[in-house]
Amino acid sequence: MIRVYSKEDCAKGKNLKSILEGKGLDFEYIEDKKQLMIVASKARIMSAPVIEYQEKVYSMDDFLKVIA
């Protein structure tokens, strides 16, 4: 399962959501700043959105390479 952690009104998060929907991928979109900060800080990622996929955490750019 793909989990996308983002924050309210995040343009990059909404863009990623559209990309995933366009690819027909199942995902959970979590719009919670506190959860985002917890997951991002553990992975040392400093920008939203942050993606959990197959027990790894990715920045948006790295994740797009994985699903390309």
Image (tube, grey):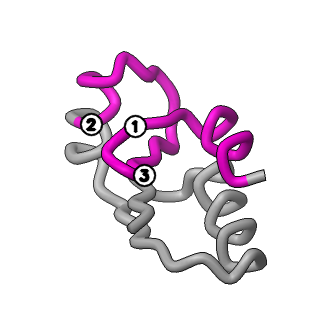
Identify residue type, mark 1: Val
Identify residue type, mark 2: Val
Q: Which residue lies most toward the top here? A: 44
Give the SS element for disc 1. Answer: strand
For residue 54: magenta?
yes
Q: Residues within 10 Å of mark 2 (few under 14, many from 20)?
A: some
Placement of 27 over or under 63, stated as above or below: below
Q: Which residue corresponds to mark 2?
A: 39
In x, y percent, where is residue 4? 44, 57
Q: Residues within 10 Å of mark 1 (few under 14, many from 20)?
A: many
> Residue at the spot x=43%, y=68% of the render?
29
Residue contact at pointers 2 and 3, CB within 8 angstroms: no
In the picture, the disc for residue 57 is: 1
| Alpha-carbon span between mark 2 and mark 1 | 8 Å
| Alpha-carbon span between mark 2 and mark 3 | 12 Å
Give the SS element for disc 3. Answer: strand
Q: Considering only order in the chain, which callout, 1 or 2, is on the residue closer to the N terminus?
A: 2
Q: How many marks?
A: 3
> Residue at the spot x=78%, y=52% of the render?
68
**Nearer the observer, disc 2 or disc 3?**
3
Q: Nearer the viewer, residue 3 or 47?
A: 3
In x, y percent, where is residue 55? 31, 45
Q: Nearer the viewer, residue 59 or 12?
A: 59
> Residue at the spot x=69%, y=53% of the render?
67
Residue contact at pointers 2 and 1, CB within 8 angstroms: yes
The region drawn magenta spans 39-67
Placement of 63 over or under 14, stated as above or below: above
Identify residue type, mark 3: Tyr
In the displayed structure image, the side of residue 23 where residue 43 appears, left or right = left
In the picture, the disc for residue 53 is: 3
Q: Considering only order in the chain, which callout, 3 or 2, is on the residue closer to the N terminus?
A: 2
